[in-house]
């Protein structure tokens, strides 16, 4: 092995370490038998996993997370698909304004957005409502949905829809039999993005959550403020594992490169 | 083509995209069973015309009639026409059989009957044993056949073909051209064919509509369009031609560039009038001095296998194109004499 090649390998190893070590530390710390986050741990124990799974506020927050993420995703998918079709396909008046407005949640700082939603929700008297949280999450994931679906829409030959129409399919049938099936890779990617973004959303959610409606990241934050035991590390390990499985599944069944628009055309359905 | 029953009629159809006028008052009548070609360069409005007939594009003004009924505002899905697209537009997520059955399912045709008709249609386009494959697994020529079968299986009132052969390589294109003509004759469906290829237009059509700048320049049989082009554009687009300015010295005698040339036109000329004449390159012969000849200089020679193209320049700089069989015996710079037969001239506007 030449010196240059050895240096190259070392750089790659360091980079990989830089990216993965924080996660690894969290995972290792989660097995601590004592109530402090010691590294390296003084033994092996699953007691903090037990604590994470049985802590009532975590259980409630997990259910909240599930409801909010599912509802927000189901809300953002049709809206985002409609927006993607309109922005890519049709000559929309004030196109740039629409595009900027729909994609703005990505660039507005979470604290500013959170404060805005808080004031709005308070004004409407909806502070305690779970719907505020759902609406906020739908808005925050919308740019990701639009972006993913747009890639599929751009790859969709308009002649396909014309062909279906010429064969006697009314617009709703064209959408169901041709447009929708061909957008499936984009929709699947959009759903994945929406779930990941929503499950991990913390800053804005902190502003519009109550103790009853708060989602898991907010509950975790509250816990960390009050306690310093490795329960947090155990829960984080669950998060890491879940995200890993989701991304792995997406790569396996959807082909991430394809749904990100990094490679060729997204036509041809999700199966390989 | 005798005037049969009128199937499609366009009356004063206009369509503009912003500043660009794609159709500038198009009148067109298509008769039962005929194959009519819309021929023209890109941007001439031929595809827009097809899209207006199909119902994909709503015209700004004018009327579209099918079998006498006003359909101008009727959407494509209610028109019952078959369309074959340049990109074939096969549904990539469906098998070949499901692609062909698409229109039958939309019409509520029963499973058993649909199966029979799909097999029939695939047999008609000579495509068997691929019913279960996906379009992506087929060659370009096979995809083309599926697209044709899918359009024909619904027994369309009119078959619309948008440059269906353009994506095929030359050899396959020529085979498909012949086959397309056979199939169209066999099913007898009234057909509108869009192309920019004059050979396709002349070889396939009962009638050709030559389009330019959103207008129909000439509508006629392939012979009409080639032998008797109505305008200089038609003469130039359908086969090459050279334009010559001539001054009449008697009823059938003109002077071109100082040379006395006898012409046989549809009318007698008035002495002293200036006429625009066209001549096809294959009618220009290179030879020795004699009657109806004109001196010229060879400005270039291009060998094209079965024939050579000789570019000539008359003494006043007028260009004249000659086509000779095989390899031309002249070379650039040489002085030659071009023979222009008296019956070779066409007069244009």
Image: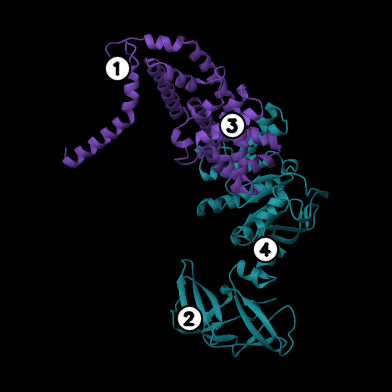
Helix, strand or loop at mark 2: strand
**Which of label 3 and label 2 is nearer to you?**
3
Few, some or many residues within 10 Å of mark 3 (<14, 14–19, 20+):
many
* Residue A117, disc: 3
Q: Mark 4 touching mark 2, by CB under 8 A?
A: no
* Position of the N terminus of chain B by quadrant: bottom right
Helix, strand or loop at mark 1: loop
Res A80 quadrant in image: top right
| Image mark 2: chain | B
* Residue B298, disc: 2
Residue labelled with disc 4: B210
Which is more toward the observer, B116 or B316?
Answer: B316
Rendered position, A128 above or below B295: above
Task: Name which residue lies at 47% across and 40% down.
Answer: A261
Q: Colour of chain B?
A: cyan
- Mark 1 or mark 3: which comes first in sequence? 1
Residue labelled with disc 1: A38
Q: CA distance from mark 1 to mark 2?
A: 95 Å
Chain letter, purple in picture: A
Q: CA distance from mark 3 to mark 4?
A: 63 Å
Q: Position of residue B130 (x, y in %)?
A: 54, 34
Q: CA distance from mark 1 to mark 4?
A: 85 Å
Rendered position, B67 above or below B212: above
């Amino acid at each position: 092995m030449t010196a240059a090649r050895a240096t190259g390998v070392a750089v790659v190893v360091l980079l990989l370490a830089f990216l993965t070590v924080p996660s690894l530390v969290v995972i290792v710390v989660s097995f601590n038998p004592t109530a402090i986050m010691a590294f390296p741990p003084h033994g092996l124990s699953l007691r903090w996993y037990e604590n994470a799974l049985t802590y009532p506020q975590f259980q409630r927050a997990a259910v909240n997370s599930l409801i909010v993420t599912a509802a927000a995703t189901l809300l953002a998918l049709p809206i985002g698909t409609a927006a993607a079709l309109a922005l890519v396909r049709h000559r929309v008046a004030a196109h740039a304004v629409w595009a900027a407005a729909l994609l703005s949640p990505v660039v507005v700082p979470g604290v500013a957005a959170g404060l805005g939603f808080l004031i709005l929700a308070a004004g409407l008297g909806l502070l305690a409502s779970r719907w505020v949280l759902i609406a906020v999450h739908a808005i925050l994931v919308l740019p990701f949905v639009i972006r993913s679906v747009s890639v599929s829409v751009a790859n969709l030959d308009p002649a396909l829809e014309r062909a279906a129409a010429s064969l006697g399919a009314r617009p709703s049938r064209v959408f169901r039999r041709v447009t929708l099936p061909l957008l499936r890779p984009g929709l699947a990617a959009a759903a994945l993005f929406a779930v990941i973004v929503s499950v991990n959303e913390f800053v804005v959610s902190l502003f519009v959550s109550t103790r009853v409606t708060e989602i898991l990241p907010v509950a975790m934050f509250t816990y960390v403020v009050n306690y310093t035991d490795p329960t947090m590390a155990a829960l984080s390990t669950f998060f890491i594992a879940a995200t890993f499985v989701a991304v792995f599944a997406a790569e396996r069944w959807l082909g991430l490169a394809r749904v990100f628009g990094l490679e060729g055309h997204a036509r041809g359905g999700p199966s390989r | 083509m005798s005037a049969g029953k009128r199937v499609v009629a366009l009356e004063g159809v206009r369509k503009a995209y912003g500043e660009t006028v794609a159709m500038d008052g198009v009148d067109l009548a298509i008769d039962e069973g005929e194959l009519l070609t819309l021929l023209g360069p890109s941007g001439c409005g031929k595809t827009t015309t097809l899209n207006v007939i199909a119902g994909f594009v709503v015209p700004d003004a004018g009327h579209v009639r099918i079998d006498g009924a006003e359909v101008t505002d009727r959407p494509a899905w209610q028109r019952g026409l078959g369309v074959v697209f340049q990109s074939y537009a096969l549904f990539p997520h469906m098998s070949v059989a499901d692609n062909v059955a698409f229109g039958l399912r939309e019409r509520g045709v029963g499973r058993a009957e649909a199966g029979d008709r799909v097999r029939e249609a695939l047999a008609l386009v000579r495509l068997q044993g691929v019913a279960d494959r996906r379009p992506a697994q087929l060659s370009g020529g096979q995809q083309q056949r599926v697209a044709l079968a899918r359009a024909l299986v619904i027994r369309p009132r009119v078959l619309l073909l948008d440059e269906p052969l353009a994506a095929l390589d030359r050899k396959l294109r020529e085979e498909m051209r012949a086959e397309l003509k056979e199939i169209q004759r066999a099913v007898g469906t009234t057909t509108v064919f869009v192309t920019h290829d004059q050979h396709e237009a002349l070889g396939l059509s009962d009638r050709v509509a030559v389009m330019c700048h959103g207008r129909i320049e000439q509508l006629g049989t392939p012979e009409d369009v080639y032998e008797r082009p109505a305008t200089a554009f038609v003469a130039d687009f359908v086969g090459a031609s050279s334009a010559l300015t001539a001054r009449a010295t008697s009823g059938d005698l003109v002077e071109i560039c100082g040379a006395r040339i006898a012409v046989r036109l549809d009318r007698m000329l008035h002495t002293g009038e200036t006429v625009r004449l066209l001549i096809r390159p294959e009618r220009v012969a290179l030879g020795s001095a004699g009657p109806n000849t004109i001196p010229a200089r060879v400005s270039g020679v291009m060998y094209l296998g079965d024939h050579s193209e000789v570019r000539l320049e008359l003494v006043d700089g007028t260009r004249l194109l000659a086509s000779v069989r095989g390899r031309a015996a002249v070379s650039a710079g040489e002085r030659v004499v071009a023979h222009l037969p008296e019956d070779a001239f066409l007069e244009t506007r």
